[in-house]
Image (cartoon, helix red, strand yellow):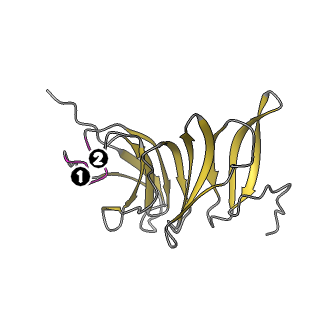
């Protein structure tokens, strides 16, 4: 007997511009071509109409993006590398930028994928520290993540180009 797993979200005005909360469920597809499947879906995050998550659907832990309006998975050409373990994704509100933690050959990094250009960039390539748990601002301009610098976990801010940001101007 197979266990059927359903991702159910309680939304507060995020999808479709609705006010208030509502419970929605998405269809189940045993082949893994929809949001819900028999595979492990890990760390789902939502930004407006998009849900991003990691899953082992293809035999390795990859990143997936689901459009709740079109009710389909979005193709992410050039994102999922065969030699990288991807986890903890987050997506900008317009769905253009996806940030995630990746581990390639024992080295952790924070990666940014641009859906428009299909480019993948390691934002922390020059940072000599373990990194984890990235998030991205709604407009996709600022990425925050944890880094184990100086024997402790600190929160660092980077821009999309992989440059550290020393402070954020709240009036921007």
For residue 20, side relative to residue 130 (left or right): left
Q: Is residue 19 magenta?
A: no
Between 71 and 163, the one lying in front of the other is: 163
Q: Position of residue 109 (x, y in %)?
A: 63, 44
Instruction: Find numbered disc 1 in the image and state the secondary structure of the residue it sits on.
Output: loop
For residue 131, side relative to residue 66 (left or right): right
Labels 1 and 2: the sequence-earlier one: 1
What residue would you read off at disc 2? 36
Query: At x 25% / y 38%, what residue is drawn?
Result: 38
Question: What secondary structure characterizes most of the magenta part?
Answer: loop
Give the Cα distance between marks 1 and 2: 6 Å
In this view, 70 is above or below 33: below
For residue 32, side relative to residue 99 (left or right): left
Quadrant position of the N terminus in the picture: top left
Quadrant position of the C terminus in the picture: bottom right
Residue 166 sits in quarter: bottom right
Q: Position of residue 64 (x, y in %)?
A: 40, 53
In this view, 6 is above or below 81: above
Q: Position of residue 74 (x, y in %)?
A: 36, 63
User: Mark on residue 129?
Assistant: none
Look at the image and give the residue range highlighted in magenta: 31-37
How packed mark 2 is, by other alpha carbons closer than 10 Å (few <14, some 14-19, many 20 or more), is: many
- Give yes or no for contact between labels 1 and 2 (Cβ–Cβ under 8 Å): yes
How packed mark 1 is, by other alpha carbons closer than 10 Å (few <14, some 14-19, many 20 or more), is: few
Residue at the left extreme, as displayed: 1
Between 64 and 69, the one lying in front of the other is: 64
Query: At x 75% / y 52%, what residue is drawn?
Result: 157
Residue 128 sits in quarter: top right
Query: At x 73% / y 37%, what residue is drawn?
Result: 129
User: Mark on residue 27?
Assistant: 1
Instruction: Find numbered disc 2 in the image and state the secondary structure of the residue it sits on.
Output: loop
The total number of labels drawn is 2
């Amino acid at each position: 007997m197979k266990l059927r797993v359903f991702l159910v979200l309680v939304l507060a005005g995020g999808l479709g511009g609705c006010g208030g909360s509502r419970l929605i469920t998405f269809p189940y597809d045993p082949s893994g071509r929809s949001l819900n499947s028999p595979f492990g879906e890990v760390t789902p995050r939502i930004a407006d109409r998009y849900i991003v998550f990691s899953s082992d659907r293809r035999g390795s832990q990859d990143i997936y993006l689901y459009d709740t309006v079109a009710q389909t998975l979005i193709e992410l050409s050039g994102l999922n590398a065969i030699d990288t373990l991807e986890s903890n994704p987050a997506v900008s509100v317009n769905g253009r930028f996806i940030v995630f933690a990746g581990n390639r050959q024992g080295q952790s990094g924070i990666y940014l994928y641009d859906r428009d250009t299909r480019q993948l960039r390691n934002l922390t390539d020059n940072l000599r520290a373990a990194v984890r748990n990235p998030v991205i601002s709604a407009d996709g301009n600022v990425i925050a993540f944890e880094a184990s610098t100086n024997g402790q976990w600190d929160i660092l801010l980077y821009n999309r180009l992989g440059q550290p940001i020393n402070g954020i101007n709240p009036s921007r």
